[in-house]
Image: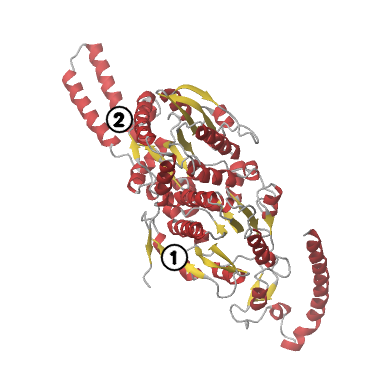
Amino acid sequence: MQDTAEQINGWRGVVVFKDLFQKKRKYATLPSERHGRDMTADQADRPRREIPEGLMNKCGSCGAIQYSKELDKNLKVCPNCGYHMRLNAMERIRYLLDEDSFVEYDEDLVSEDPLGFPGYATKLEQQTLKSGLREAVVTGQGTISELPVIVAVMSFDFFTGSMGSVVGEKITRAIEAATESRLPLIIFSTSGGARMQESILSLMQMAKTSAALARFNEQGGLYISVITDPTTGGVSASFAMLGDIIIAEPGAVFGFAGRIVIEQTIRQKLPDDFQTAEFNLQHGQLDLVVHRKEMKSVLAKLLELHTVKGGD
Amino acid sequence: MAGEMPFETPLVEMRKKIDELKQFGDEKGIDFSDEITRLEERYRELEEGIYSAISPSQKMHLARNHQRPTSLDFIQLIFTDFIELHGDRLFGDDLAIVGGIAKLNDTPVTVLGQQRGKDTKDNIARFFGSPHPEGFRKALRLMQQAEKFGRPIITFIDTKGAYPGITAEERGQSEAIARNLRDMASLRVPVICVVIGEGGSGGALALGVGNRVLMLENAIYSAISPNGAASILWKDASKADQAAEAMKITAQDLLEMEVIEEIVPEPKGGAHKDYEAAAESIKSSVVRHLNELSSKTADELREERYQKFRKIGKFGVAKK
């Protein structure tokens, strides 16, 4: 792990140096050729707006710009700095499951506004437009390297992945389906916590999903929890931390109380790596930190190791 | 009277007036008894009006009243022979959660609760009733001990939430809460939970997976504190009153949503006005529910508890 990081850093060093060198040469020669002598350097430097929307993508961590297609091939991991960009649930399913193996469950469940909370109904509509999803989790069954699994995949781009009645219900149904069919269960979590627009009903989804996992657990079912960036609050303190095996993606932030809340409470600056996957691994809260490119093969290996049972 | 709330000001003022009139009459030897009777009548009407229309935000302030009885107050008043047990056997003893064995009438039970401090010093030692992971782990240890010896479990819920801090996170706050939720669901003994003050978020729920969840009349219970909701929604924590009105946090709201089984009445004006009466009220409710549960088998208790939480949630089905 460390070796790779050093290699990348070293390689980056070279690129940066080369870039600087080239930039200097361009600065001296290109403006006059392109735009004539009356152009100021400032105007010449400004990029021309001819890049179609969505063609390029900027890394949220290092700022490197890539072709979206290339980035997609790289599973939305920045080739420059290794930053794991947040995925929509459908993207993750495409990256993870065998092609055309996914069958979605309960796709028609939608949130209502049980408390009549100001602005909730409108906000729900906006989330669907933004994410293309009906709710913050997609559940169903499929195969990973031909091994059948039941999956639940959360999506941060729908209402910050918050858990309301629908998220709790879909996850509970997925757990119950795994219990009935005796298939392994994998949940990919990402969430800002309970959905406060459904207040107490959201909170109770923590108990509901955990109780369903208690039954699955007693029956001997395999549950792998994969924590992705970010996972906090009610999701972190329920099913995300109840896996037989708990995996996180590199750099994923997870914990119960968010950084801002803690900083406001203790009035102290927190270390930069606080609550990252690596920090949590060091503190014994995780089994593994797995790079997105390795995720499918690691999951397949774990599933395979649980298909043969000793004893019976 | 102690611990008056702002909405009680008209009552306090009127009581003062009546007392002044009485004193004046006594001093001057004038008979005001007719006037006083009329004023007392008027006082009772006013009292009735005020206490029957306590708003959600007023309940929030009542639930947080410093004079309100805490878990230990209720434990002392409801049970006998309480022996407090300490520690999670892993790291330490978190004083934000208290627990132990006691007798309810003649039945040995395990009793637990989040514990606010009585004064500043006590509050600092108890982290203002906000538990660390070791508190939740102590609670689970005592609950599993109760299960081993076939003792029913009674929990008191009273916390703003789990402690938000570095060490709590390092020691697995999320894991501790999650494990309690899962393992409480599996317990083979009756579990009765009573929300006595503020039920704040996951830190409250970590003692809240019971066969029966009861709530004191003026207690509140929510996914996020009204202050927290206000600071997220309107970037202004001082709008907590406004958030409290929108969030459906009262016992009456939760009964309607079938999250709780029963509202436990409080003495007029709140539990802090009469500790004994409030304790008696809780005791009679708990005893009644425990009697109902005592005839059930372990499997029935587990199934009933599962179904209770399984059915919570409201959603729709989209038209194609």
Q: Position of B5 compared to A303: left or right?
A: left
Q: What colour scheme governs how the chains and residues are painted in the rendered image of this protein?
A: secondary structure
Residue B230: in sight, yes or no? Answer: no
Q: Nearer the viewer, residue A206 or A22?
A: A206
Image position, residue A165 (x, y; %): 43, 56
Query: Which residue in the protein does label 1 denote?
Result: A106
Q: Count the numbered circles shown.
A: 2
- The quadrant holding residue A40 is bottom right
Subunit that carries the residue with mark 1: A
Q: Nearer the viewer, residue B164 or B320?
A: B320
Q: Position of B9 compared to A244: left or right?
A: left
Image position, residue B242 (x, y; %): 40, 48
Q: Position of B153 compared to A297: left or right?
A: left
Report the residue at 48% width, 60% height from top.
A177
Tag 2 secondary structure:
helix
Q: Nearer the viewer, residue A39 or A45?
A: A45
Image position, residue B80 (x, y; %): 44, 21
Q: Which quadrant, please, contains the N terminus of chain B?
A: top left
- The quadrant holding residue B195 is top left
Query: Which residue in the protein does label 2 denote?
Result: B11
Q: Identify the amino acid type marked 2.
A: Leu
Tag 1 secondary structure:
loop
Residue B139: in sight, yes or no? Answer: yes
Q: Is residue B112 above or below residue A162?
A: above
Q: Which label was assigned to residue B293?
A: none
Q: Nearer the viewer, residue B44 or A231?
A: A231
- The quadrant holding residue B249 is top left
In space, the residues marked 1 and 2 are separated at their CA atoms by 55 Å
Subunit that carries the residue with mark 2: B
Q: Residues within 10 Å of mark 1 (few under 14, many from 20)?
A: some
Q: Is residue B125 above or below residue A175?
A: above
